Amino acid sequence: MHNPQAILFDLDGTLADTAPDLAAAINAMRAQRALPPVHYLSLRPFASAGARGLLGAGFNITPDDADYEAMRIEFLNTYESALAVHSHLFEHVTTLLHGLNQLGLCWGIVTNKAQRFTKPLISLLDLQEARCVISGDTTPYAKPHPAPLLEAARRIGVRSEHCWYIGDDLRDIQAAEAAGMTSIAAAWGYCGATEPTQWKADAIIDSPLELLELIRAKHLQVATS
């Protein structure tokens, strides 16, 4: 783990709890079809998996199904119409970001969420201080491909090996590893179908404040070595 010069974050499930509005979009679609709602806790783990994961959990369909593309478009439009009704930053995220600023560390966001959703959310969640925001359609590839993370490093002017990337999904850890970045699993997030202990991340943290402690400890270690 290199001493960090920049900290990059996933958005959904890492900085922001967006699952309530994503789940609400699925249940709005079910209501249109006279289907009962799916319990929120059954949908929440799939919030970082995008339309594919949520439609799979809500309707048991995959991209191979004939109706999938039409339902994907419907889901995205439904979600966009009520983007941040209940979404909010996770507890202590604001303190974490303030702490990074005090340490002189720049931070940015790398998400698989498309720019049409990311751009308004950044404003609604008061994350405009991010040095860069890389959306799922900023580069030709999405995570776990390293291209979005490498583009973030390029934009902030920090070599990838001096960046830490924090995310709540296996794809985040895979992308960080492929980009040569330190990978940190955010265990407070959605985490998907597998436990963070199986991801082979460089570190696993249980709260945003724990990340701040880890960074300060690393700085102290370097300063006294």
Image: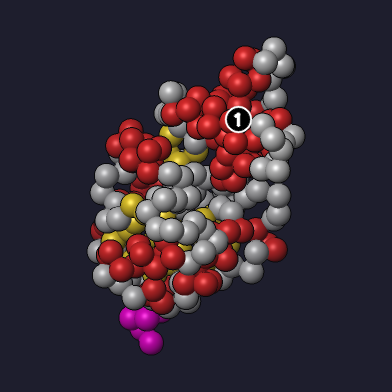
Query: In the image, residue 165 lies at what x, y percent?
Result: 45, 63
What residue is pinned by disc 1? 71
- From this view, report whether residue 149 is shown above or below residue 53: below
Looking at the rendered structure, the number of numbered marks drawn on it comes to 1
| Callout 1: SS | helix
- From this view, report whether residue 126 is shown above or below residue 27: below
* Residue at figure coordinates x 68%, y 62% from the top left: 197
Note whether residue 169 is visible: yes
For residue 124, which quarter of the picture? Answer: top left
- From this view, report whether residue 179 is shown above or below residue 97: below
Q: Is residue 97 left or right of residue 40?
A: left
* Relative depth, front residue between 29 and 182: 29
Which residue in the rendered view is the most extreme toward the right? 60
* Residue at figure coordinates x 47%, y 27% from the top left: 77
Image: magenta residue range: 220-225
Which residue in the rendered view is the most extreme toward the front? 66
Q: Mark 1 Cα within 10 Å, few/some/many (few <14, many 20+)?
A: some
The quadrant in which the C terminus is found is bottom left
Query: In the image, residue 187 lies at what x, y percent?
Result: 59, 53
Q: Is residue 198 left or right of residue 74?
A: right
Query: In the image, residue 182 lies at what x, y percent?
Result: 48, 71
Q: Is residue 32 magenta?
A: no
For residue 147, which quarter of the picture? Answer: bottom left
* Residue at figure coordinates x 56%, y 53% from the top left: 168
Query: In the image, residue 5 lies at what x, y percent?
Result: 32, 71
Q: Is residue 223 magenta?
A: yes
Note whether residue 21 is visible: no
* Relative depth, front residue between 99 and 224: 99
Which residue in the rendered view is the most extreme toward the top? 34
Q: The disc labelled 1 sits on which kind of residue?
A: Met
Q: How is the image coloured?
A: secondary structure
* Residue at figure coordinates x 43%, y 34% from the top left: 88
